[in-house]
Amino acid sequence: MERTHRIDLKLLRYFLAIAEELHFGRAALRLNMSQPPLSLHIKELEQQLGAQLFVRHSRSVALTHAGRILMAESRRLLADADQALAKVAQIGRGESGRIELGVVGTAMWGRMRPAMRRFLQDNANVEVQFHEKSPGKQMALLERRQLDAGIWRMVLEPPPGFTSLRLHESSFLVAMPEHHHLAACSAVPLEALRHEHFVTLPQVHSDWAFLQRVCLQAGFKPIVVREAVEPQTLLAMISMAMGITLMADGYAQINWPGVIFRPLETRIPADLYIVFEQEQVTSALTKLIEALTQPSSEGV
């Protein structure tokens, strides 16, 4: 059975100093210690390994075969240890690391886009893994600690231990075919959509579930004629005059042929929030939160 050694790295550093100097006195001076305790540490190391490392003469020191092998291995082990500790220190300072970030698709547009771009440029050693999930799935992953943070709209009161911060204001717009009769309006009353045909995301989608409630509060149930899984499919349907929909204003950042966007007379908020467990916040995540919550000089 292979023997497991539990040797303090400090002993290897003492050994390496002597192996390189081939002189106990010079090694002790290099290590800023006296010679007697250094000799005791080397005897301790030899006893732990069960091997003689030095041949000691009256005025010189020579490495044994075991000592030469340990010299090469100690250099490698200490270099690896220094590198590993430096990496951990970088993570502690937020200079490197990995962030598992949940997002809703529309979060990638608007003000988050330039802020995230700057963060990635300024923190090249921080890897951000994006997971496009619904808010409910993000929250479940956060509670299982499989995500470091989640970003979605219209956040509800988070569970105990979790923090919610608003990243920026955003609004829902009416997306309609370019020749729609409401296109002439500078702002559309929500009530004007009472008899319109809607194309929507599935009913379980958080945005649409919220928007349905908003329409019901305005006194009508939206007439849904088609559903699509992907927002870009909805926009293609709208461009073919198959209906209208309500979408976060981030989509208006892109030119969708045949589609125009109009604000509502009464703003429906689509504000973005970041949600995280305070006890699990890393230095890298702290930097990301700071970058995303800083006021932006760029447009929405």
Image (cartoon, rainbow, N blue to C red):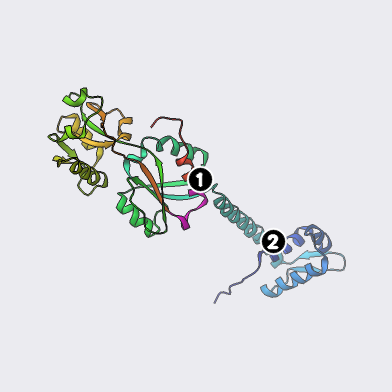
Name the image quarter holding the N terminus.
bottom right
Q: Secondary structure at mark 2?
A: helix
Residue 44 can be seen, yes or no: yes
Q: Is residue 286 magenta?
A: yes
- The dominant secondary structure in magenta is helix
Q: Is residue 103 visible?
A: no
Q: Of circles 1 and 2, which is in front? A: 1
What is the quadrant of the C terminus in the image? Answer: top left
Highlighted range, magenta: 277-287
Q: Residues within 10 Å of mark 1 (few under 14, many from 20)?
A: some
Q: Amino acid at mark 2?
A: Met
Tag 1 secondary structure = helix
Rendered residue at 22%/26% (across/down): 258
Q: Position of residue 252 (x, y in %)?
A: 30, 31
**Label 2 belongs to which residue?**
71
> What's the residue type where badge 1 is placed?
Lys
> Which percent across, then down, holds residue 60?
84, 64
Toward the bottom, the furthest residue is 1
Residue identified by numbered label 1? 287
The answer to whether 127 appears left or right of 34 in the picture is left
Count of labels shown?
Answer: 2
Q: Is residue 220 magenta?
A: no
Q: Identify which residue is drawn at 35% across, 56% down.
A: 141
Residue 64, numbered circle: none
Q: Nearer the viewer, residue 94 or 167?
A: 167
Residue at 42% across / 58% down in the picture? 161
Is residue 24 or residue 173 the one in the foreground? Answer: 173
Most foreground residue, 174 or 128: 174
